[in-house]
Image (tube, rainbow, N blue to C red):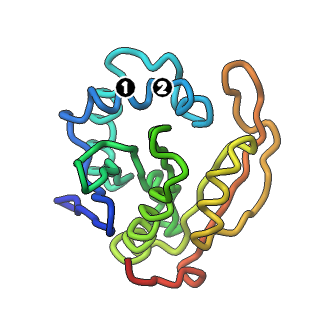
Amino acid sequence: MLAQSTLETIRLILRPLSLADAPLLQGAAGAHEVADTMISIPHPYPDGEAEQYIQRQIQNFKAGHSVSFVIERKSEKAFCGVIEIRDIEREHSQAELSFWLTAQVWGQGYMSEALKPMLRFGFKNLDLNRLYAYHMVRNPGSGKVLQKNGFIQEGVLRQRVRKWGVFEDVKIWAILRGDWRGEAV
């Protein structure tokens, strides 16, 4: 992998992260409502964390461990979230899918739209057999998006994470290459 692809849907552009995205990422990830249901986003979001995150993602991409995309609305090139395939395990041909959107665009179908080219990318470009995703039980919206896109719930990991001092149950979902229909975007 030398150059990262840009993916498109009817309403969205999924493009590589760059350091120029740091201010928008910092503001969006720093929103309490975003951090509240994300396992790995702290709140308050520390100054400089966006730059560090982007640099880590660029390095992880170069090493073949992950691929991250900014989700933008085509109409105004507006930053509205991040989606990534991370922890790529070549031996087992699997990886984790992780995603989040700014609260302003929740409920508009953007994440479900973004998942379609990401699944294609994971199964076709990365030659994966399995993609899995986690979400906190109290964030059922993420589960609905996964289910709508062919993921099957595999279980509940009781008190798997600690978010703001509270142990949270987490659901794990997965989709196999054989489950994926590969419909056109």
**Camera-nearest residue between 28 and 133:** 28
Using the image, determine if residue 181 lies above or below residue 41. Answer: below
Tell me the amino acid under the disc marked 2.
Ala
Residue 161 position, x and y percent, is 70, 34
To which residue does mark 1 refer? 27
Tell me: residue 75, above or below residue 154: above
Residue positioned 57% across, 84% down in the render: 178
Give the CA distance from mark 1 to mark 2.
7 Å
* Residue 31, label in figure: 2
Q: Residue farthest to the right?
A: 158
Q: Is 32 displayed left or right of 2 in the figure?
A: right
| Residue at position x 53%, y 67% in the image | 92
Whole-percent x and y of residue 149? 57, 70
Location of residue 55 in the rendering, given as x and y in whole percent from the top left corner = 27, 34
| Above or below, 165 relative to 136 | above
Specify the amino acid type for callout 1.
Gly
Q: Residues within 10 Å of mark 2 (few under 14, many from 20)?
A: some
Q: Are marks 1 and 2 in contact (CB under 8 Å)?
A: yes
Q: Looking at the rendering, in which quadrant would you find the N terminus? A: bottom left
Residue 3, disc: none
| Quarter of the rendering occupied by the C terminus | bottom left
| Secondary structure category for the residue under label 2 | loop
Q: Is residue 112 left or right of residue 50?
A: right
Residue 160 percent location from the top left of the image: 74, 38
- Residue 52: name its quadrant: top left
**Quarter assignment of residue 10:** bottom left
Does residue 95 lie above or below 9 as drawn? above
- Residue located 23% across and 48% down the image: 76
Q: Secondary structure at mark 1?
A: helix
Residue drawn at x 48%, y 49% as measured from the top left: 99
Q: Tell me the crowding category of disc 1: few under 14, some 14 to 19, or many 20 or more residues within 10 angstroms, Cα based.
A: few
